[in-house]
Image (cartoon, grey):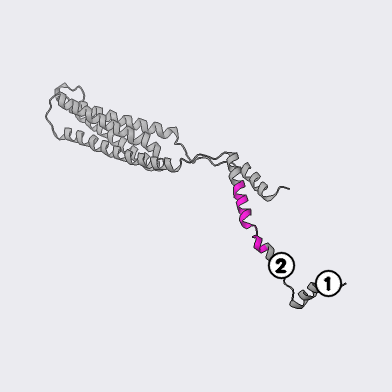
Amino acid sequence: MLASPYRAIWTTSRQTIPRANATDVSWLWKVVAACFAALNLVGYMILAVVVGSPPHELRINATVSTVAAFVFVGVSYGVSTLITFAQRHQKRFLLHSIFIPYSTVNLLALLNILFHVHGRSLQINTLQIINICIPTASSVCYALAGILIYRECGHQRVEEGTPLLTDEEMQRRQLLRLLGERSTSAPSPDLVRNTYRFDLPEDERAQKDWGHLTP
């Protein structure tokens, strides 16, 4: 039967070393986020064409196209909000699949609308102002959220940056801990000496002192 320190080391070595609790997000969530980010871009591209083109040059119904574009944009924002709430604990997924793509898409949509308006020297109306303000505000909001998430992920990476221990290192640390416990629990030399020490009365001590002189 193994001694208790070595038995504890044997038990520790047979245990599985814990791994980092980094649960990855399913690929389905990533595909859905990418599709609705693309839908957001499509909606803004339709708005840029409708807003940046004179009515007589359009071969499509401007009202229907505008409504469809706003539906695409609204649904895209709504789904991104739902994904953010559903995967609120997966910071890295939100950073790479929601905040960075949506801030980039909104920035591209803003530049596209400004290019159409400025390139055709169109007069600014209410619809154009709305089409400029919405992607601007959305791009800023998604960018700020991405910066906050990035900083939080950086702090978590520093806290979780401790390397995993191998079996040999676990055994060595366990052995040192057990040896430290045994050394601290061992009785002191004074206590050992006091355990085997006893004092004789004065008369018995005198008899023992004179006993070696008796023939």
Q: Position of residue 48 (x, y in %)?
A: 21, 28
Q: Badge 1: how crowded within 10 Å, few (<14), some, or many (20+)?
A: few
Magenta portion: prevailing SS class: helix
SS assignment at label 2: loop
Query: Of 100 and 184, which appears nearest the observer?
Result: 184
Q: Residue at x 59, y 49 (%)?
A: 177
Region in magenta: 175-191
| Relative height, residue 103 to residue 203 (above, below) | above
Q: Is residue 186 covered in magenta?
A: yes
Q: Position of residue 63 (x, y in %)?
A: 20, 30
Side (left or right) of 110 relative to 84: left
Query: Of 108 and 163, which appears nearest the observer?
Result: 163
* Residue 25 sits in quarter: top left
Q: CA distance from mark 1 to mark 2?
A: 25 Å
Q: Residue at x 22, y 28 (%)?
A: 111
Q: Position of residue 115 (x, y in %)?
A: 19, 26
SS assignment at label 1: loop
Disc sitting over residue 197 in the figure? 2
Q: Are marks 1 and 2 in contact (CB under 8 Å)?
A: no
Disc sitting over residue 213 in the figure? 1
- The answer to whether residue 172 is seen in the rendering is yes
Q: Residue at x 77, y 75 (%)?
A: 206
